[in-house]
Image: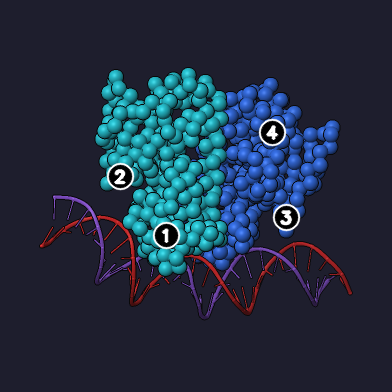
Chain colours: A cyan, B blue, C red, D purple
DNA sequence: CGCGCCATTGACTCTGGTCAACGCTAGTGG
DNA sequence: CCACTAGCGTTGACCAGAGTCAATGGCGCG
């Protein structure tokens, strides 16, 4: 299973090896996702301040950022990669409640314990803030809190859309909505591409959409047979976006 | 279908008839749900201020507080009754994303348009704030924003639990989790009772749990046959809470 | 080369959906 | 006062979409 990320803190460097952090840290001023993230609320001065509160962390695929029910000692700003957020039932059934992309913030609720588990899907980089430090900083920066609240509102809206998907849509509609939604999110962060990259496994997709791996696979095959997509390794090329969107909207 | 609530504003009185508001307004200082609601973040002074910004509204069963996609000109603090929040698919399929109870806040996201529709289930009373006015007030009261954010975090957590329910649980588990969850919420607002009151229709329960009315009915019957519940008009008496909770947790 | 993992496909099952009948209750009007 | 109706909930019979179980294929890696 996923190893725990040993976030040992080298006292002098803001770069934390996490699982295996090869690259040095980019300065916040140069951050590619800055304007997409909560940090867009901050001016130069504040950016420097918050930079000093954070560590840049790398996470290898399948490594955990944090686990459900653990004391929430840190919050994260994802800058690169992809993270799956999930909950487990006692018998092992898993529901993925979201995939976090660059610009997404983990730990919005600022609660004492994590409500979900988070695992890197791909090699992931994130800025890590000790929760208490971060919460204190937020307390003196209302515009940052405002920004966090906007993010929470957006998350809530996505969650409600996902409830509609899980409660009322067919397998084909779920897959279509998933692909359309992911494409939109990737486009918003400047990663639009003819071929949609799907780094997560079929099992991940199934656990996100409330399906089984077999149904996901069959549905991809059907959409490919209908010339809506072309299934490629670790991705899909959307051949007929209008048709896919029509299926997605129900 | 649900009539639109004509929120005609009598210029002198803070009591808005809404659909049919028979009773006068209770002062915020006497508000029964004050400590449960976002208002708990406010001191006496602020309570008076916010009281002057709001109108007390009544909504008859089946009347709309607001509708999805409409411009969000108001936010609400529910003080009495029950509200269903739902989304519709183009073909009429409905997913209820939550039931709001006294103390709940509607319009957390403070966005330009409502993301869901809201309809009174029972006779409902709510404090109505013009969104712009409310947003301006929040901007100068960071501790109120903080409180709103806590509420948003809590909502998000509930939404994630609901995703697990919709994505991974059986019909019986859904019903059990619904009953246990509702009982807990009612207990938290001081409405605990041996017999759980279920003012919403079977169709509402079905649309909340991603089931059909027939499956809801059959599952209630099964739980009754198993002596876990006793089904009564507009409610259920929980005969075996331990068993129900065991089913609910999966 | 062969092992293991993941995805795909097929055959069959089953949970929950669909369709239809029926009953109960509340409201209405003769 | 009671027949009639409308709406909601329950129940039964049947159906279908997705799940389960199992076999196979493809690919990367030791």
Pick the quarter of the image with the C terminus of chain B.
bottom left
The image's mark for residue A211 is: 1
Q: Closer to the camera: disc 2 or disc 3?
A: 2
Mark 1 or mark 4: which is in front?
4
Disc 3 crowd rating (10 Å Cα; few below 14, some 14-19, many 20+) is few
Looking at the picture, do discs 1 and 4 lie on one chain?
no
Q: CA distance from mark 1 to mark 2?
A: 21 Å
Q: Residue at x 37, y 62 (%)?
A: A217
Q: Which mark is residue B132?
A: 4
Residue hosting label 3: B2
Task: Write down the chain letter for disc 3.
Answer: B
Q: CA distance from mark 2 to mark 3?
A: 49 Å
Residue under the point 57% across and 50% down: B97
Query: Neighbour class for label 4 at 10 Å: few (<14), some, many (≥20)?
Result: some
Front-most of residues B33 and A141: A141
- Left or right: residue B19 compared with residue A33: right
- Looking at the figure, which quarter contains the N terminus of chain B? bottom right
Q: Badges 4 and 2: C-beta atoms under 8 Å apart?
A: no
Q: Which mark is residue A62?
A: 2
Q: Residue B52: horizontal and vertical position, in percent?
A: 75, 28
Whether residue A168 sits left or right of residue A67 in the image: it is right
For disc 4, the chain is: B
Mark 4 or 3: in front is 4
Q: Kindly state the secondary structure of the residue where label 3 is placed.
A: loop
Residue at the spot x=62%, y=24% of the render?
Answer: B141
Answer yes or no: is residue B195 visible: no
The CA span between labels 4 and 2 is 45 Å
């Amino acid at each position: 299973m996923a190893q725990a990320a040993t976030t040992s803190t080298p006292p002098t460097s803001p770069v934390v090896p996490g699982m295996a952090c090869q690259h040095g840290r980019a300065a916040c001023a140069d951050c590619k996702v800055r304007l997409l993230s909560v940090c867009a609320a901050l001016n130069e001065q504040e950016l420097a301040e918050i930079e000093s509160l954070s560590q840049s962390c790398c996470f290898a695929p399948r490594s955990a950022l944090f686990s459900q029910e653990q004391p929430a000692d840190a919050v994260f700003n994802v800058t690169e990669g992809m993270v799956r957020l999930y909950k487990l039932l006692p018998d092992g059934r898993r529901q993925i409640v979201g995939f976090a992309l660059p610009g997404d913030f983990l730990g919005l609720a600022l609660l004492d314990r994590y409500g979900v588990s988070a695992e890197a899907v791909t090699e992931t980089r994130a800025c890590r803030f000790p929760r208490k430090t971060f919460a204190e900083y937020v307390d003196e920066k209302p515009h940052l809190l405002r920004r966090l609240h906007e993010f929470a509102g957006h998350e809530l809206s996505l969650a409600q859309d996902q409830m509609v998907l899980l409660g009322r849509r067919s397998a084909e509609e779920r897959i279509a909505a998933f692909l359309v939604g992911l494409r939109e999110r990737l486009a918003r962060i400047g990663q639009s591409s003819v071929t949609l990259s799907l780094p997560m496994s079929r099992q991940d997709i199934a656990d996100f959409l409330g399906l089984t791996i077999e149904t996901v696979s069959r549905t991809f095959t059907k959409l490919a047979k209908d010339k809506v997509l072309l299934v490629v390794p670790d991705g899909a090329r959307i051949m007929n976006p209008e048709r896919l969107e029509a299926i997605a909207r129900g």
